[in-house]
Image (cartoon, rainbow, N blue to C red):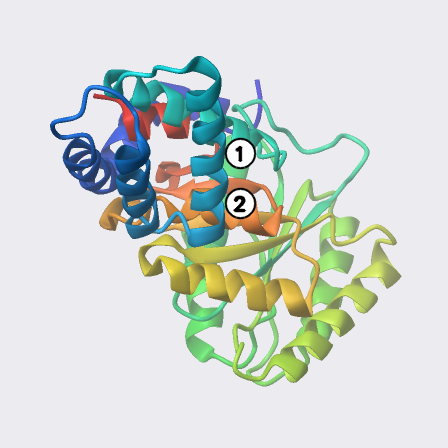
């Protein structure tokens, strides 16, 4: 059983509830798109294109999906509108599969890496520190020894928030005074985690994207300093995005990808929005796997992303 396996029982219910607003929006638009039509023709495809774009899937990804369906229509000669749901579902699952998204609940920390270091990046307000807290909780519930590093030293609120999470779930938080060098905090965190046999280290970072050069240099320095303690660190650079911002999240993802190498995505706040389609577009366009999705306030509402379960829930009647 992987890290998140103990939450399987609740997972489908949380997923269905969390995607409800997106699902209602997509279905109402799909119903209008095929109204009065018995087969998938050019009009239906045009309407479907509009549905996907307005659901924040993104223009480029939408065109890719429509092109695949056009090829299928041309090959099969006749496809009824009642088949469109399952065809659309298949195409999106296939698209997500191309991006090597985590698929299932069996992901576990590689046994060859101890501690496994996750550097977490993202702009302020996307739920970055909360995501770190939820991950720390779930790792600890799975029996892992967790350390947190408060390397966003430019915001007192960020350090306080991560300390609150640490106190709440009983995991050590390594921090320094306000304005301290973030790389120094990361160095101290890894040294302490290594010395105390930690399994997982989660390090928070500043989210000042308006100062791209400064942030890029800061992240580069943090990585360099980490390698002095653990040559392979960080094992993962996770970008946290707020799914409720739709295409703005996509723009943030592109900008972060331009200043540092992103290896995984966590997309939060999907339960409060009808813009869940952004998960599909971001994963496709960035070629970076979506690893976690946030579907509520509780720690267990942060889930490992399973592309098939996600799409099945999105298109379930």
Residue drawn at 55 percent across, 26 percent down:
103
The residue sitting at 49% across, 51% down in the picture is 60
Q: How many marks?
A: 2
Task: Assign the C terminus to one quadrant of the image.
Answer: top left
- The image shows residue 192, relative to residue 276, as above or below, that is below
Secondary structure under tag 1 reads helix
Q: Nearer the viewer, residue 314 or 195?
A: 314
Q: Is residue 174 visible?
A: no
Looking at the image, which is closer to me, 299 or 189? Answer: 299
Q: Secondary structure at mark 2?
A: helix
**Residue in the foreground of this view, choosing between 59 and 293:** 59
Measured as percent of width and height from the top left, residue 167 is found at 44, 55
C-alpha gap between disc 2 and disc 1? 7 Å
Measuring 62% from the left and 46% from the top, which residue is drawn there?
A: 287
Q: Which residue is mark 2?
A: 283
Q: What is the quadrant of residue 83 in the picture?
A: top left
Percent x, y for residue 233?
A: 78, 53
Q: Earlier in the sequence, mark 2 or mark 1?
A: 1
Residue 223, numbered label = none
Q: Position of residue 135 (x, y in %)?
A: 50, 44
- Pinpoint residue 133: horizontal percent, then vertical percent: 46, 51
Query: Marks 2 and 1: CB-CB under 8 Å?
Result: yes
Establish if 180 lies above or below 230: below
Q: Compared with residue 146, is residue 20 higher up or lower down, i.e. above or below?
A: above
Neighbor class of circle 2 (other Cα within 10 Å; few <14, some 14-19, many 20+) is many
Question: What residue sits right under mark 1 in the picture?
Answer: 96
Q: In the rendered image, which quarter contains the N terminus?
A: top right
């Amino acid at each position: 059983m992987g890290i998140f396996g103990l939450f399987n029982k609740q997972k489908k219910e949380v997923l269905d509830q969390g995607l409800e607003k997106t699902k209602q929006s997509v279905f109402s638009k799909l119903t209008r798109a095929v109204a009065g039509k018995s087969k998938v023709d050019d009009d239906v495809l045009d309407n479907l294109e509009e549905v996907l774009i307005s659901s924040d899937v993104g223009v480029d990804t939408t065109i890719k999906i429509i092109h695949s369906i056009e090829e299928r229509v041309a090959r099969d000669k006749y496809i009824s509108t009642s088949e469109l749901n399952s065809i659309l579902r298949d195409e999106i699952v296939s698209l997500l599969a191309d991006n090597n998204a985590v698929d299932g609940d069996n992901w576990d920390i590689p046994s060859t890496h101890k501690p496994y270091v996750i550097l977490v990046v993202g702009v302020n307000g996307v739920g970055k520190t909360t995501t770190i807290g939820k991950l720390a909780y779930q790792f600890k519930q799975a029996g892992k020894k967790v350390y947190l590093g408060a390397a966003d030293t430019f915001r007192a609120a960020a350090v306080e928030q991560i300390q609150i999470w640490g106190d709440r779930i009983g995991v050590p938080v390594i921090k320094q005074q306000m304005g301290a060098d973030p790389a120094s905090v990361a160095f101290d965190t890894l040294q302490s985690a290594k010395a105390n046999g930690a399994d997982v280290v989660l390090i928070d970072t500043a989210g000042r994207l308006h100062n791209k050069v400064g942030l890029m240099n800061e992240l580069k320095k943090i990585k360099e300093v980490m390698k002095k303690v653990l040559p392979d660190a960080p094992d993962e650079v996770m970008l946290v995005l707020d799914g409720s911002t739709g295409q703005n999240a996509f723009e943030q993802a592109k900008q972060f990808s331009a200043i540092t190498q992103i290896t995984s995505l966590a997309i939060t706040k999907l339960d409060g929005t009808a813009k869940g389609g952004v998960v599909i577009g971001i994963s496709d366009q960035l070629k970076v796997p979506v690893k976690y999705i946030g579907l509520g306030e509780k720690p267990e509402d942060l889930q490992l992303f399973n592309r098939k379960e996600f799409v099945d829930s999105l298109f379930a009647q």
